[in-house]
Amino acid sequence: MSGNDRSPEKSTDYERNRCCFIRKVMLSVVITLFFAVILITVFHLYAQCIRRRQARRHTVLQQQSMGEAAAQTHPLQPPKTGLYPSLITTLPAFVYKKPAELNGPAIECAICLCLLEEEEMAKLLPNCDHMFHEQCINMWLHTSFTCPACRTGAELKAGEGEGNQPGVADVLAPPMEALLVV
């Protein structure tokens, strides 16, 4: 018997085993690559998320530091998003009483769309005479400086309300002594 005398049965078994082995190796390689791609994608998405979070924090910190600097240099200038809380408190607030002569529709708060009821706290915007629930308009004015119904400026002008609201002019205008420079 020579070395070339392999039977066809042994040859096909050898080829089959070899082919099976190659298939197993290829399948293992493909599965490993698939999981490697998935893992790299997950890490990439995680890194993007972290970078965005850090960018947002950085932006917020910059805005806060600029906001503090602007507040120190311009204390009477209203913020870009709404009125200062000290200005919001100067707007006239009162307990709502329905007028006896009012037979028409009741007054509705344009923010929450509920009717003003007797004995509820309300605020009247001085520049446009629109009336709202006190909590509703306070929340609105923290984010906006205009009337929600007509978009008129909501802050009191200097000199307004001196008779009925003491201290309003002090908040809005500098003292006269500061204006008179000799």
Image: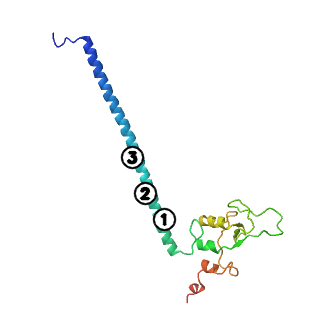
Front of the two marks 2 and 1: 2
Q: Quadrant of the C terminus?
A: bottom right
Residue at the disc numbered 3: 43
Residue 54: mark: 2
Q: Is mark 3 on a helix, strand or loop?
A: helix
* Above or below, comparing residue 166 to residue 24 in the picture: below
Whether label 2 touches label 3, CB < 8 Å: no
Image coordinates for residue 149, horizontal then vertical, percent: 70, 63
Horizontal arrangement in the rendering, residue 11 relative to residue 50 (left or right) = left
Q: Mark 2 or mark 3: which comes first in sequence? A: 3
- In the picture as drawn, the residue positioned furthest to the left comes out as 1
Image coordinates for residue 87, horizontal then vertical, percent: 61, 73
Structural distance between the alpha carbons of marks 2 and 1: 14 Å
Horizontal arrangement in the rendering, residue 116 relative to residue 59 (left or right) = right
Q: Is mark 2 on a helix, strand or loop?
A: helix
The amino acid type of the residue labelled 3 equals Phe
Residue 63: mark: 1
